[in-house]
Amino acid sequence: MSDEPLVRVDDLRKRYGDEEVLRGISFEMGRQDVQVLVGPSGSGKSTLLRCVNRLTEFQGGEIALDGTPVTEMDVDDLRRQVGMVFQDFNLFAHLTAKENIMLGPRRVLGKSEAAAAERALDELDRVGLSAQADSYPGELSGGQKQRVGIARALAMDPKLLLFDEPTSALDPELIGEVVEVMEDLAEGGMTMLVVTHEMGFARAAATDIMFLDQGTIVEHGPPEKLFENPEHERTAQFLERLTRLHGETR
Amino acid sequence: MADPVLALGALSADWQYVFGNVDYLLGGLWVTVGLTVASLLVGFVAGLPAAVVEVYGGRYSSALVRNVGVVLRGTPIVVIIMLAYFAFGLSPAFLAATAALGFRSGAYQTQIFRGAIESVDGGQMEAARAVGLSKVQAVRHVVLPQALRRSVPGFQNEVTIVLKDTSIAFAIGLAELFTKSADLYQSIGHTTATFELIVFISALYFVLTFVTNRSLEALNNAVAIPGGNGR
C-alpha cells in the first residue's frame, strides 16, 4: 500500500440541512505533505477538517486514510491515528499539562502510567514546555496552552495531524512560538492538514496550498505558484489580504 | 464552675424540662443525622447517573429521567413519605423515610449535576473524542471530574434542605429529632414547654447546618482547580 496516498479525498459533499457547505472536494496528500487550507470564513475549511476524523459526518464522496475509507473504520480507531489541534485549545482544565498529554496514551493506547508520563515529558520537551509539566491550563498563556495541545496530539503517534486555526485565538505576540513548533514538525516529516491564516507558515512549510470558497476548491498548488502566479484573480486578492493581515509575524 | 443542678434551678420549669430530657432529644438527633446521610447517599447514587442520562442519553431514556424528576419535584414531601410508608408499606419507618427523602433528593441532585455537566465546555468533550476516547471514557475522565467540583455549592444547598426536611418523618412517627420534641411537648402537663422545645431543637438544626456548610465550603476550596477553569 506504499504507493497509496496517505489521505485521499474524493468528491466530498457535506450538507447542513438544505445548505451544501462542501460541494465536491477532491485532493490527495502523500506522507510528510503539509497541506494548508485557506479561504474566507464559511468557505467550509474547518468542516472539511472535521470530516477527516469524523467529528462531523458527511453525506457524499469518500475520504480514505491509508487506502481505507474512514466511514468503514471504527471511529475511535480512526481518531487514534489522526490527531487534532483546536483553535480554542480545548485542554482538560482539571488536568496538568503532563496529565493532559497522558490521558490518551493511558486510556486509549493502554500504556502504563510510567510509560505515558515519560512520553508526555518527551513531548513537552519537544514543544519547549518541560518547566510547565505540572501547571494547569488556567496557569498557562495561550501560546503555552496551544503547545500543550500539540504535544497532546503528538503523544498518540498520529499518522496525520489536523490543525483547525491553531493561532486564531492567540494574542499576536504569542503566535510565533506556536508557528515555530508547527514548522519544526513539518520539517521533521509530520503529515499535516492545516487551516490557518498564517501566510508566513504557509510560505515556509506548505507543500501545497488550497484556496476554498463556498465549498469548492478555487485553486490548489504549491505556495510559489499561488503566491507568485495564481490562475485566479480571487486567489491573488485573498492571499494578498491575508499576507497583509497575518503575514510574516516574526 | 457552677453546680449544674444549681444552674438549672435558675431556669423556668419548662427549660428545666427541656434540659432534663437532653439525652432523649440527642437520641433523635442521631436519627436525624443518619437519615440525612442515608437520604443524600440514595439521592447521589440515583441523581448522578440520572443527570448523565439526561444530558447524554437517547431521546427516550432522557425523557424518562426528566419526567420522573418532574413528578418527584412536583409532589409534596409529606405525600411522598406517606406513600412510601403506608401505600408501599416500606418498613421500618427509617427505611420509608430514607426512600422518600432519598429519591426526592435524587430528583433535585439530578438538576444540580445536570447543570454542572452542561457547564463544562463542549470543546473538551470534543478534544477527548478526537484523542480517541469513547463517549463513556470522555464523560468519566474529562466531564465528570470537573462537573463534580462545580456541583459542590449546589450540593451544599441540597444538604441543608434534606437535613431540615428530615423533620417530615414526624408524619410517620419516626423517632428523629422533631418527633422526639413533639413526644415531649405532647406529654401530659408539659404542653407549656412547646416553645422552649422548638427553640432548642431549632438551635440543634442550626448547629448542624452551620457545621455542614463550613465543611462543604472547605471541600469546595480543597478541590478547586489551580488557575481556575481556563482551558
Image (cartoon, coloured by chain):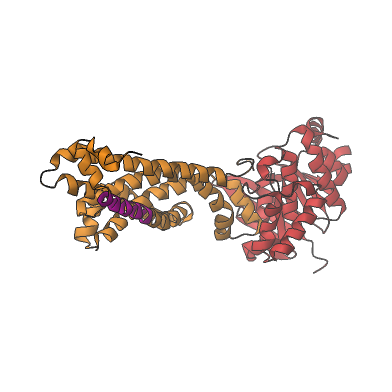
Q: Residue furthest bottom?
A: A1
Looking at the image, which residue is at 20% across and 60% down? B87
Tell me the quadrant of the picture where the C terminus of chain B can be found: top right
Up the image or down, B9 lies above or below A80; here it is above
Q: How far across and how far down the image is residue A62, in percent?
A: 67, 59
The magenta stretch is B23-39
Residue placed most toward the observer, B222 or B65: B222
Q: Residue at x 74, y 33 (%)?
A: A171
Name the magenta segment's main secondary structure.
helix
Tell which residue pokes out farthest to the left in this image: B188
Drawing shade for chain B: orange
Residue at the image point whose x is 81% and y is 41% from the top? A177
* Image quadrant assignment for residue B206: top left
Q: Residue A206: horizontal and vertical position, in percent?
A: 84, 47
Residue B27 is inside the magenta segment: yes
Q: Is residue B97 visible?
A: yes
Question: Which one of the lettered chains is coloured red?
Answer: A
- Which quadrant of the rendered structure holds the N terminus of chain B? top left
Q: Nearer the viewer, residue B133 or B225?
A: B225
Residue B6, image x, y percentages:
26, 39
| In-front residue for pair B164/A223 | B164
- Residue A109: name its quadrant: bottom right
